[in-house]
Amino acid sequence: MPETRLPIDDCLPQVLSALRENNCVALRAPTGAGKTTRVPPAMLDAGWAGGGQIVVLQPRRLAARACARRIANERGGRLGDEVGYQVRFERCRSPQTKIVVVTEGILLRMLARDPFLESVAAIVFDEFHERSLQSDLALAMARRVQQSVRTDLRLVVMSATLDPTPIASFLGGCPVVESRGRTFPVDVQYLEIGANRSLAERATEGVAWILDRTEGDILVFLPGAREIRQAAAALRSLAAAHDLHVAPLYGDLSPEQQDAALARGRRRKVVLATNVAETSLTIEGVTGVVDTGVARILSFDPHVGIDRLALQPVSQASADQRAGRAGRTQPGVCLRLWPERTHRQRVEFNQAEIERLDLSGSVLQLRAWGESNLRAFPWFQAPPEVSLEHADTLLQRLGALDDEYRVTEVGGAMSQLPASPRLARMLLEGHRLGRPEPVALAVSLLLERSPFGRGEQRITRHRSASGVVESDILDRIAALEAFESQGDVVSSVGSLHRGAAKQLLRVRDQLVRMVADFAADGPWEATPVDGDEAVLRALLAGFPDRLVRRSKPGSRFGRMVGGRGVRLSDQSAVREANLYLAVDVDAGEAEAMVRQASAIEREWLAEEQLTRRVEVEFDNVEQKVVARRRTYWADVLLDETPAALPDEEQVAAILVQQASQCLDDVFPDDD
């Protein structure tokens, strides 16, 4: 057992007793109580791993690694032996591992590969108050397994702030255990700094303000790695003057860099962290917190039809969690960089992701898992009906589900990829067409922050070697490839930010490796094509519901699937194509603005997804009944040709209807 005693230790007998009698327990314990590092080892020492593993769910990669490392250290072992972890693109575990800390996507894939969780003895859901979509889904799936085939499976749901009563009710009225934790008072102050100042400048001013008001280390909350790097640069002179060690803390850092941020040092330390430090990690020695008040939060982006990280104000609950970090070991100080008068205008809690994110990935996971009736599935919180309907419709358009909502071969492959269905479909298509790298770069452009500045731009017409297409996406890919090969930062679509461009290229490489692992035995035959064509075909595979037909040659206006009128941006490289994909759409205007588009060829449209029918109608120009044979992609008319008129009775009926309409126009109702 570790020497340092933590508040949760007094509650461990209650937790174990509840699990012994019920196999489920809801635990509420404040940040710093020790629940993450003490509950799983207590379960292991009680002999409950058996021949399986105790899986600990953490919402973030950095927290998963740090949690596993902390448990291994406290038990005097080496990371990867008794205690290990697995996150996307990285694993440190062995056949001897009994406690494995994983991120949410890993647990969902474990459920997909092992539906009865035969290799798992218990699951600990940590930080459940964050209410991520994947943790909600994983809990519901695990509960389904427990109730149907694995009554011996133990489930622990832990939270720092969430009311445990609904959780206990969901788990069959299981016991609730609460730990008070150990905290000291925190003096919360507010400082309004001009909005014209950058986030890095405001953070630096906040550190300068708090330096003389507390003697311990300082934790600064920033929204992302880019802002952390900028703040580190802005702090250099202040750090030199006060002999401060500035340590970044975010997900992509090496384990050594993470350890440097988490451990006590000889010099006073300023830790620049993302919201991973709100609840998931313990940073020793912090008595001062500077809160910039913003975070990158996963949200559905209607412009591109996928979930992306967006900069948003943090909730009151998150701000309180951040402030509490200053009072872990002694009284502390928290400086909030926004006016006190606006604090109550912030939302109290973040909305649960199941209420605001795209559900297509979750629906595909469940249908691939064998769930046919999603309305009867035991959700912890049932999603909106319209969200389920939208998800099923999108999955059918992507070819992941058939007309009976059964998972297709392509859908099965998509469900194995740790990416949203749209992007998974693109990646699989890039693999099938023999061009995974450029397609992965296109996916990166959709996932990540744009690396292009708002400098002067000129319209380009990017054409493939065959002279086929125009594409804003291909222009951006060409700029990134030129940056990678030659270091060019000036392009036709704006100047490149080096850091953001390098991040995109890193994501591309990760995606290529991921697809190579998952798609090698996919349900298709490889049909290599030109790299540019592969990107555009992949975009069509991922965005079939974004097809637009131009209203007439040379016009900026068109009609998109669903009937929405759209207008191409004047800056778009798509100048002549009759058919194109509206990849990035701003729907805030009467005619939605298409900011990024890519032309496609008519012959790329899959024959089985086209609808052909003869339509008979009265032609107001020709003043007669005509028949036309029309071809549609969804509800977008692709082409039409004259057809023979049907029998005389149908023609007569149309004429009568038209005559009635004319009479109504001439003699309207007198009311």
Image: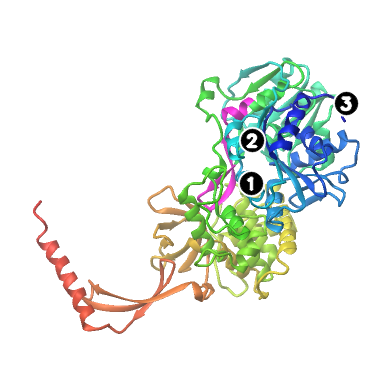
The residue tagged with tag 3: helix, strand or loop? loop
Q: Within the magenta stretch, is there residue 648?
A: no
Residue mark closest to the camera, 3 vs 2: 2
- The answer for how far apart the CA atoms under marks 2 and 1 are is 12 Å
Residue at screen point 59% across, 30% down: 163
- The residue labelled by disc 3 is 3
Graded by Cα atoms within 10 Å as few (under 14), some (14 to 19) or many (20 or more), the crowding at tag 1 reads: many
Looking at the rendered structure, which numbered label has been put on residue 143?
Answer: 1
Which of the two discs, 1 and 3, labels the residue nearer the N terminus? 3
What kind of residue is marked 1?
Arg
- The answer for how far apart the CA atoms under marks 3 and 2 are is 31 Å
Q: Quadrant of residue 315?
A: top right
| Residue 289 percent location from the top left of the image | 69, 24
Q: Is residue 625 left or right of residue 31?
A: left
Residue mark closest to the camera, 2 vs 1: 2
| Residue 88 percent location from the top left of the image | 73, 51
Residue ranking furthest to the front? 21
Q: Within the magenta stretch, is there residue 314?
A: yes
- The residue labelled by disc 2 is 174
Q: Quadrant of residue 479?
A: bottom right
Q: What's the magenta region?
A: 298-320
Residue mark closest to the camera, 1 vs 3: 1
Q: Is the residue under label 2 in contact with that under label 3 (CB below 8 Å)?
A: no
Graded by Cα atoms within 10 Å as few (under 14), some (14 to 19) or many (20 or more), the crowding at tag 3 reads: few
Can the viewer see residue 492? no
